Amino acid sequence: MKLLLGRIFSVSIKYVYQRGNTYYYQRKLPKDLLHRYHSATHVKVNLKTSDPGLIAKRVRELNRQYESTWAALRGNPELKPYSVREAAVKMLAEYGLKPQPADNDEHAFDLLIRVFERKHEAYAQGDEELYRSVEPEEFLDPVELEALRLLNEEPKFRLSDALRVYLDGHKNKDKKKFRADTERVWGRLIALVGDKELEEVGRVDAKEFVTRGIAEGVKTTTIGRYISILRAIFNVAIVEREITKKNPFLSLRIPGLGEDSKAREPFDNDQLITLIQECKKEDDDIRWLLALQIDLGCRIAEAAGLTLEDLHLNAPIPYVSIRPHPWRTLKTKSSKRNVPLVGVSLWAAQRIIQTAQPGQTHAFPRYTDKSECKATHASNTLNKWIESRLGVKKTTHEFRHTIRDRLRNVGAPKDIQDAVGGWGKEDIGDKYGLGYGLQQLRGWLDKIVLGGFK
């Protein structure tokens, strides 16, 4: 666009447009890199000035930044759009250096600068005029260029920094799945708006995140989960960095939320009996995992993450203790509960204990160890097996809906249903705990047992 300099002169600057009194940098993403940015097509940055000189300077800086990033992405198919900076930080660390405003050791600083200087000299090949006029972009690779920038420029708190702040202080920071899920969602945002300063992300960006997700065919409830993650990260970053800014993802409306969801169909009794018979026939750890869910109605992670000590078969009323573990947390506080083992779930628990190997601690070592519970792997395997046996697409999660229906059909009160499935309030377990509580729960669970276990 053209910017007026005084009353006479104007200058044309590419990649700039004006909205109201605000000037923005906007540039199309290279076609060959679009797939690396999910479905974003442009980068857009608020220039935060109306001064033509400052606009021109910031546009030059942004062009260099993005062109360096794109060069790095072309050179390394494993890089993410915001990984160039991470690689530059690692490079500095190899020399014992940190980005501004760190007080770096002069000797370490000189060592790195000498490396850059040798590349400078090699590029010029003795041509003094070329040596004086060449820009660093021409003889440094994108990571080196970013490292140089980090050493000389005042630091900016970017989206990638906000993610690190959030993860470093989170109780689940060491859980692979939590980190992967969080990084994936945050990566979607960065792919859409670029790794810009957190303060620059506004309501327009948040709305565009929703619009883009819907256009991609992402379920509205899934977008809702994404928004919850983004909102949480912004909340932490705003507080920790003492940023005066309203969270752009607060009270964000999602058009048609839930209207595109398909109602889950519970298993009918014939399907349950078929699965029970097939589980007994194959009689292995994968089928025991599924059988546990049938008459417990628990989530697959709750079952897959059990230890042998969680199965209390020698108690007057055999029961399973569903509690949090370092390798598997629970979804809600009310998910912590004790549930009687009946029917095919009792059979599965017995088989797990009977076949346990010396030194075994986990009920399902195929899927769980001391560091993680691979519930998704288990779910994928069981869902395929269910489809192969029943000829319909249903998932293990439907066992939770099914057990509520089964209990409701025999007249079980809602608080009993909640106590079995962990749906109730935080104190529901106090009412239905050990002793009389287990006996009460077993009385209702005995009424829904199928498949010849009565």
Image (spheres, rainbow, N blue to C red):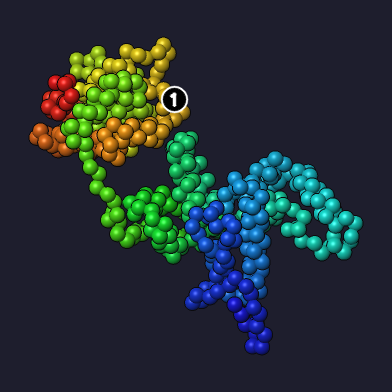
Between residue 37 and residue 44, name the one nearer to us: 37
- Position of 407 with respect to 220 (left or right) is left
Q: Is residue 237 above or below residue 47?
A: above
Residue 155 picture location, percent across and down: 62, 55
- Position of 199 with respect to 7 (left or right) is left
Pointer 1: what residue? 369
- Residue drawn at the location 35% of the way across and 52% of the way down: 219
Local SS, label 1: loop
Q: Which part of the image, by quadrant, shows the N terminus?
A: bottom right
- Position of 128 with respect to 160 (left or right) is right
- Residue drawn at the location 24% of the way across and 24% of the way down: 277
Give the residue furthest to the left: 411
State the image quarter where residue 368 is shown.
top left
Between residue 190 and residue 324, name the one nearer to us: 190
Q: Is residue 173 above or below residue 356?
A: below
State the image quarter where residue 69 is shown.
bottom right
Give the residue furthest to the bottom: 8
State the image quarter where residue 210 is shown.
bottom left
